Image (cartoon, rainbow, N blue to C red):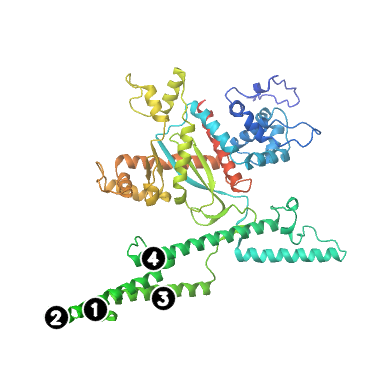
Amino acid sequence: MARRFLPVDRDAPALLPVNMLDWVPKDHVVRLVIATVEEVASPELIARLVPAVRSVKGRRRYDPVMLLILLMYSCMRGVLTVRAIEDRCRYDVTFRVACGKQVPDHVMISRFRKRAFGQEGLAEELFYRVLFVCAAAGLGRLTVVACDGVKIAANASKEANRTGAGLERLAAKILAGAEAAEAAGQAGQVPPAGADLPGGQELPAGWRDPKSRAGRVRACLEELRSEREAAEAAVRAQGQAYPDALQAGTAAGRTPAAVAVAAQQIRVQKAVAAQQALIDDREARRAAGAGSRLGRRPVVPGDAAGVRAARARLAGLQAAAEAEAAAGEENGKKPQPARNLTDPDSRLLPVRGGGFIQGCNCQDAAADDRLMPGGYACQDTGDVLQAQKTDEIAVKGAAAAAARAGDPAMLRDCHDRLCTGEDQDSPGHDIAACHAAMTGGIRTIVKDAGYSSKDNISAPGPDRLTATGKTRNLEKQAREDPAEGPPPEDATPAQINSRRLRTPEGHALDKRRAPDVEGLHASLKDRTGLRRFRLRGLTSATSEFLFAGTARNLLLLTAIS
């Protein structure tokens, strides 16, 4: 039996619709991006995207709103390199709709992205404007908000890290090269390409280039020097405060490692003084005629059990300090603070599974429906120091997302999308009150064990639940030793938090953390392709992260539209 196929005629003329928007379906994501960005792009925001006019000559500029739409749609499609964006603008129909048949070259796209992401607060303003639009459409179930950190690689190699000594050697090498170039110029020879000018720090302000190699080395050295001075000042303050408190008898908490030997020496002196005070007291009573009521004579301070134990502890601390110093001399110096010459704002961060990456620790939050209320990039290797700031961005995002649907039909649709209660279809269910309870503010913030500390748990703010260990251990505790009823009246905030994790309600809240925020991180890395920042600097990294979060929120908005 003969087979019949559809004919393929690539030379046939194509009659496209006159209106470009008809090239794509009405429910296509590019239509939503165009409508949303054009709605939130205020004149003040547009003015910040356009550089100052230097001359009226030359061709007209591209529309900044069009370039912003193009960047947003590219991020949603996972196309992040400027050459790939330019290529898509030539042959991809949806990209041609986004850019209005104009084809900005990769240099223009790169300059616009650098200007947009390099300005402090511009990407954040755009993020919260889009967040309000998403909330008005029915996103943002704030009953549970999960916070976590994700490490994103920087546009720099970890091989470019240098310690203070390495930076000084590199600065000396640059200076020697500059002097050789100057000598060659005076001898009538042409200096080699890329030679540094000698004495660059004395050049006029208009001629200095902080982005040059010499400028970056000087900036890294100054930052390391100021950081070392601040750390030494903190150690000196700590080393003075704790021994003084110990001498006065008011010291509390664990002894700082930097003053462990000095603190133990004070304890030895106090133990000797206490034993000598016993001997002196007995002699005073003997001189007063106490007679047989003197009791047993105290041993000399060197033979007292408390003094011997204190001196043994001191000897152990001194031996440990000497062994550590000897090991450091034998195996090399301790790991020293380092700075990256390519991106001084990035840090060497440990990652799950072992190893390190050169990047930034990005903190964010995820609502119960995985809407992202906010985020930022920081330099800390861990999360414990960022706990209170993540609470602030979660509360700020919740306030920005506190939108209400005025139309009853829209309110009904929004409620049906958010409500997970069993009585949502009952006749007595109050839709307006239920919707306000879900979107009016954060009910509970849940965090993993990386944020666990006494200060973070007891800090003021919204209701929070912080894990104190691995998930499997928490599940075992909740299963084998469940807690019920109110906590004891004299319980500390840390004890209340640990007890709450063993209750059925607390355990259920903790189980909702990982799917929400880890799902958000997976979407940022896999859907938008944000595995490495394109720009350098902490401000640009924060802007890139928030821009990817904006694209992620628009993808959620597309899913419900």
Looking at the image, is mark 4 or mark 2 earlier in the sequence?
A: 4
Looking at the image, is mark 3 or mark 4 earlier in the sequence?
A: 4
The foreground one among 551 and 64 is: 64
Residue kind at label 1, given as amino acid type: Asp
Looking at the image, is mark 1 or mark 3 earlier in the sequence?
A: 1
Residue kind at label 3, given as amino acid type: Ala
Circle nearer the viewer, 1 or 3: 1
Looking at the image, is mark 2 or mark 1 earlier in the sequence?
A: 1
Numbered circle sitting on residue 289: 2
Residue 419 lies in quadrant? top left
Circle nearer the viewer, 4 or 1: 1
Looking at the image, is mark 4 or mark 1 earlier in the sequence?
A: 4
Numbered circle sitting on residue 107: none
Whether residue 209 is visible, yes or no, is yes
Q: Position of residue 526 (x, y in %)?
A: 55, 41
**In the structure shown, which secondary structural element does the residue marked by tag 1 occupy?**
helix
Identity of the residue drawn at 85% across and 61% down: 190
Residue identified by numbered label 3:
319
Disc 3 to disc 2, C-alpha distance: 47 Å
Q: Is residue 530 left or right of residue 455?
A: right
**In the structure shown, which secondary structural element does the residue marked by tag 2 occupy?**
loop
Disc 3 to disc 4, C-alpha distance: 24 Å
State yes or no: discs 3 and 4 in contact (Cβ < 8 Å): no
State yes or no: discs 3 and 2 in contact (Cβ < 8 Å): no
The foreground one among 72 and 319 is: 319
Looking at the image, is mark 3 or mark 2 earlier in the sequence?
A: 2
Numbered circle sitting on residue 244: 4
For label 4, the crowd category at 10 Å Cα-Cα, with few meaning under 14, some 14 to 19 and many 20 or more, is some
